[in-house]
Image (cartoon, grey):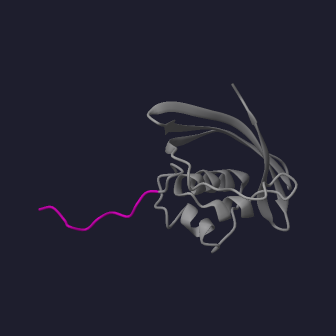
Amino acid sequence: MLSNKTSPALCPCGSGKTYAACCGRLHSGQENASTAEALMRSRYSAYVLKLADYLLATWHSSTRPSELDLSADDSKWLGLEIKHHEQQDAGHATVEFVARYRIAGRAHRLHELSRFLMEDGRWVYIEGQITP
């Protein structure tokens, strides 16, 4: 017998957890990311869900744009793969990732090595270096 019960939505970051148990807790402000990788995953999910305020709030003030308008972005995000996460010391970390997306039916991939900083007890994104 089939159930009419729908299962909770999985998190866009690919963790295998539900959104509410994963990036949703960070997006809502219930908690801060415990690692740079967790912040990276939550930022990817924020792009998928077009949460510009969250992206700006987790971006270091020295590199953060003054505004971020995702309303016209017609990207269809297809998946995130974390290649490597390294914490250099208590306040610095890097995350290498590949994000796949589609624009106007054409597939793209973004391969980046991102730098993160622990500031005032929370991880923030500093910048990324695109890898061809």
User: Quick check: is 2 in the magenta stretch?
Assistant: yes
Residue at the spot 83% in from the left edge and 51% down from the top edge: 63
Looking at the image, the residue that sits furthest to the front is 72
Looking at the image, the residue that sits furthest to the top is 132
Q: Quadrant of residue 69?
A: bottom right
Q: Quadrant of residue 23?
A: bottom right
Residue at the spot 33% in from the left edge and 63% down from the top edge: 7
The spot of residue 6 in percent (x, y) is: 29, 65
80 lies left or right of 127: left
Type of secondary structure dominating the magenta stretch: loop
The spot of residue 100 in percent (x, y) is: 54, 37
Q: Indicate the quadrant containing the C terminus: top left, top right, bottom left or bottom right.
A: top right
Residue at the spot 82% in from the left edge and 57% down from the top edge: 60
Q: Which residues are magenta?
A: 1-10
78 lies left or right of 27: left
Q: Nearer the viewer, residue 129 or 76?
A: 76
